């Protein structure tokens, strides 16, 4: 299982690139295969669309059982909303003996945070707003607890064409516990074409362009903006400060 990071080839690890080059078959969502096309010319590939993750995972496992060297790719890190867990579930279900390696990648939240500056410098929670695999009641509870705990919060999958109310509900929850002036960073297409970065406040979050390729980072009570940077204080006592 290979994490290809946020999208740029120079954000991939040497280990990930070498694993792909050494593979006979590369399995993944078509968009992600396109991102690494320059690394895998001539390789046998297998792709399928969104919500076909089980098909891709089973294909990868079947080919590995047949003796092939297979890479199944995830954007970001394969163990964070990626394919690693599903592949390992299938392997355990089949109780089969295949050599398995999980190769980490830069998670999308980290890529977005780096573009914003240093917003994740203290305790933070990462929450997906997609309720396709998780009941909304569970997501809502996690949003409430994270907001009450003054966590920095990174939101994955905030909005799609068919899911536009979840982000509105999330912002309403945050406004119950966080000031409307709380710093918010919105990063779309991190490290890809059409990358965009917006610094705003919690009360103005919904006026921005948001989709499934967007990561939203909501600061805590110490987060501030200086020039183009979103910064969360770690707690160091600087000279001249109380």
Image (cartoon, rainbow, N blue to C red):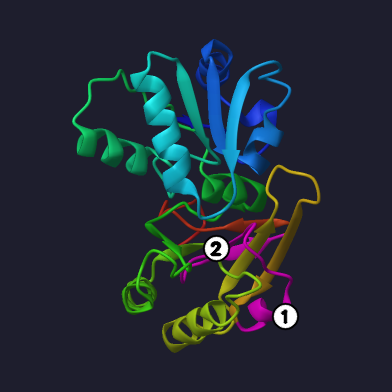
Residue 1's disc number: none
Classify mark 2: helix, strand or loop: loop
Q: Residue at 73% of width from left, 43% of height from top?
A: 192
Left or right of 171 on screen, residue 96: left
Q: Residue at 68% of width from left, 72% of height from top?
A: 200
Image x and y of residue 47, in percent = 59, 38
Name the one closer to the observer, 201 or 5: 5
Q: Is residue 162 above or below residue 98?
A: below
Q: Specify the quadrant of the image occupied by residue 147.
A: bottom left
Answer whether residue 212 is magenta in the image: yes
Magenta-drawn segment? 203-226
Residue 152 visible within the image: yes
Q: Earlier in the sequence, mark 1 or mark 2?
A: 2
Image x and y of residue 87, in percent = 35, 37
According to the image, label 1 marks what residue?
207
Image x and y of residue 181, in percent = 59, 80
Q: Residues within 10 Å of mark 1 (few under 14, many from 20)?
A: few
Which dot, 1 or 2, sits closer to the camera? Answer: 2
Quadrant showing the N terminus: top left
Image x and y of residue 97, in percent = 23, 20
Q: Specify the quadrant of the image occupied by residue 93.
A: top left
Quadrant showing the C terminus: bottom left
Answer whether residue 221 is magenta in the image: yes
Q: Marks 1/2: CA distance?
A: 17 Å
According to the image, label 2 marks what residue?
157
């Amino acid at each position: 299982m290979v994490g290809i990071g946020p999208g740029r080839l120079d954000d991939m690890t040497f280990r990930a690139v070498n694993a792909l080059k050494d593979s006979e078959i590369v399995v993944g969502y078509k968009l992600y295969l396109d991102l690494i096309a320059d690394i895998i010319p001539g390789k046998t590939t297998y792709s399928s669309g969104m919500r076909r993750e089980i098909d891709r995972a089973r294909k990868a496992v079947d080919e590995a059982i047949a003796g092939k060297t297979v890479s199944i790719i995830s954007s970001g890190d394969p163990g964070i909303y990626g394919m690693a867990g599903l592949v390992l579930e299938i392997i355990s279900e089949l109780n089969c003996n295949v050599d398995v390696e999980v190769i980490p990648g830069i998670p999308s939240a980290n890529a977005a945070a780096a573009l914003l500056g240093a917003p994740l410098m203290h305790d933070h929670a990462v929450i997906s707003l997609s309720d396709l695999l998780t009941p909304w009641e569970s997501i809502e509870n996690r949003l409430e607890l994270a907001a009450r705990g003054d966590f920095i919060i990174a939101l994955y999958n905030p909005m799609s064409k068919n899911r536009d109310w979840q982000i509105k509900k999330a912002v309403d929850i945050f406004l119950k516990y966080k000031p409307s002036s709380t710093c918010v960073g919105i990063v779309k297409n991190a490290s890809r074409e059409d990358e965009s970065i917006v610094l705003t406040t919690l009360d103005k979050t919904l006026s921005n362009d948001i989709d499934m390729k967007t990561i939203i980072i909501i600061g805590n009570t110490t987060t501030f903006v200086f020039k183009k940077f979103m910064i969360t204080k770690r707690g160091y006592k600087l000279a001249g400060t109380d």
